[in-house]
Amino acid sequence: MSAPALPAPPAHVAYTVTVADTQERRLHVSLRAEGLTEGTQTLTFQLPAWTPGWYVLRGNERNLSHFAVQGPNQSPLTVQQLDARTWQVAVKGSKAVTFSYDVKASDTGFGFFEPYLDQKHGFVPGPATLAYVVEGKETPCSVRYTVPEGWEVASANTPVPGQPHQFTAPNYDTLIDQPAELGTFTRYQQTIEGVPVSVVMVGGEPARYRRWADGVFKIAQAGIKLLGGPPFERYSFFFHFANEGGFSGGLEHLNCTVLRIDPSNLDRPDGDNFAIVAHEFIHAWNVKRIRPAALGPFDYTRPVRVKDLWFAEGVTDYFAPRVVVEAGLATQRFWLGYQAEQLTQLMCNPARHQVTLEETSLKVWESENESEGYGGLSYYNKGLVVGLLLDTELRRRTENRVGLEDVLKALLAQCQKTGRGYSDGEIERTAARLAGADLSAFFNRALRSTEELPIKETLEAGGIFVDESVTETATLGLTWEAAAAGQIRLKSVVPQGPAAQAGLRAGDLLLGLDDLQGGLLAQRVPGDSLTLRYQRGGEQYTVNVVLGKEESRSYRLRPLPRPKPQQAALLARISGLRP
């Protein structure tokens, strides 16, 4: 006896997002599942537990309220809430079901992970705003934004001709990976390699936008050239110039990126600023289309673990300053300084002896440092350094014919051909095939061990002189960030380090301090004892910590004074100085 056939998914899911009340900062969302079959008994609606690109369970359901479910002719239907993010509806033979709710839109800084609304502007990030039909994630979707008169809507989803503020997407994953800007904003547009590219800006002083926009278009041109052409039909950069919320950075999406930048940077869009833009733009290739198999189609209900975030984020970060140089927005000196700063950060981090690079990816969901790695080690940081060494090694072995961008291009072709993401080990196999060499020793050392990386010998082969200085300093064995005035929050605590042995943990607040390295530890030596006050769970404690010893390293990179021709050519390529 065969199992009964599952009911067919809805034929279409139509969303409407309405600016309901700018004073109360409230959006209203409705989604109508249409074309239900007679065999459909129940329909389940769910809000994602996390946002792709940010590996943290955020609890966005706390912003939803006033739920309602209706059948045709506004007939009420029975709904059961299964958990904080899931609602099941008894369909009763209805051909269509409408699920609606309100969303509190009070994120800071014009919005980022969560929705934002005021009297002039709104921002709608899909995962925090739009629930999905569990039985119909692959169903074609549309979304219509109902906004006050005079407001504009910008989205990288496909616009519906003749229907203002309405867009379509082939499925839910695509729909929510294109946030929407609502309201009044400044928009610049340019066609690059046949593709329309938009720069949308809010916040700060619009009179200062132009220099930024010009630089962004140059970055788009350079990135498309580096990676072999645009993989998208349109692309948008959404800039929020704001300093509220204590967060600056960007988040990648399929055909766009959202960047929150402190408005003080409007007057000086320097190499570091543009590197953030380049990083997010490169993600349109690396992680959005060149992706681990588990990162699309997405399971939004639980943490999704992959080994290769070092490649998705760190290698993306490695290419960012090169794109800035190739765009003509910085020099080789900037590129060398950028790499040196990353080397210094890694080699001053004792966590490199405790955590492997693959572990930082697999365990990021348990991290205290908000989607950057695990155990105090960042896959952005070490992943960038490994990317630098891998690019150099590939070029050394192939007489500069093959570089790391060729690995990206090969993986992109494979993902496009198979229609899936890459599996474990495919990055390594692809790099080895292009190099014509066994790279297992390199990858085992870089990804799956805590051995020191072959920095000097690899970079000197690439035409780079590595100037390293080493000093012995006292350490608490932790990383930290400023909290409120007179407080320091511990971001991570090195296992078996001085702070860990004294009982301190990530998340603790040190009291009566504004700084550690430049103040409290500057005049101390290993073996000294410190008395620290800290707060945990509303209670205050006092602890004595005996300072440990660590070697503090700093790096400067510069071209070899008398390089061989192949070394000079290699450095020119990896740093963005094309012949």
Image (cartoon, rainbow, N blue to C red):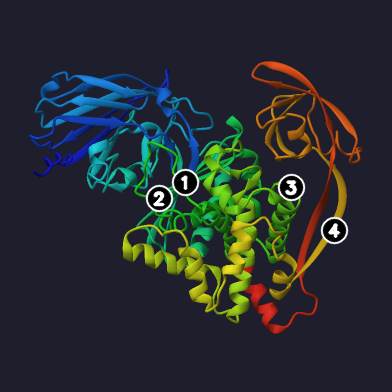
- Three-letter amino acid code at the position of disc 3: Pro
In the rendered image, residue 135, in percent from the top left (x then y), is placed at 23, 38
Q: Judge the density around disc 3: few (<14), some (14-19), many (≥20) Cα neighbours within 10 Å.
A: many
In this view of the protein, which residue sits in the foreground, 412 or 493? 493
Q: What element carries label 4?
A: strand
Disc number placed over residue 350 in the picture, else none: 3
Position of residue 382 relative to residue 547, above or below, is below
Compared across the picture, whether 206 is left or right of 516 comes to left
- Three-letter amino acid code at the position of disc 4: Ser
In this view of the protein, which residue sits in the foreground, 563 or 446? 446
In this view of the protein, which residue sits in the foreground, 561 or 117? 561
Q: Do the residues labelled 1 and 2 touch (CB within 8 Å)?
A: yes
Q: Are marks 4 and 2 in contact (CB under 8 Å)?
A: no
Judge depth for marks 3 and 4 and give the one in front: 3
Disc number placed over residue 294 in the picture, else none: 2
Q: Are marks 1 and 4 in contact (CB under 8 Å)?
A: no
Disc number placed over residue 469 in the picture, else none: 4
Q: Distance between the residues labelled 4 and 2?
A: 42 Å
Asked if residue 539 shows in the view, the reply is yes
Q: Judge the density around disc 4: few (<14), some (14-19), many (≥20) Cα neighbours within 10 Å.
A: few
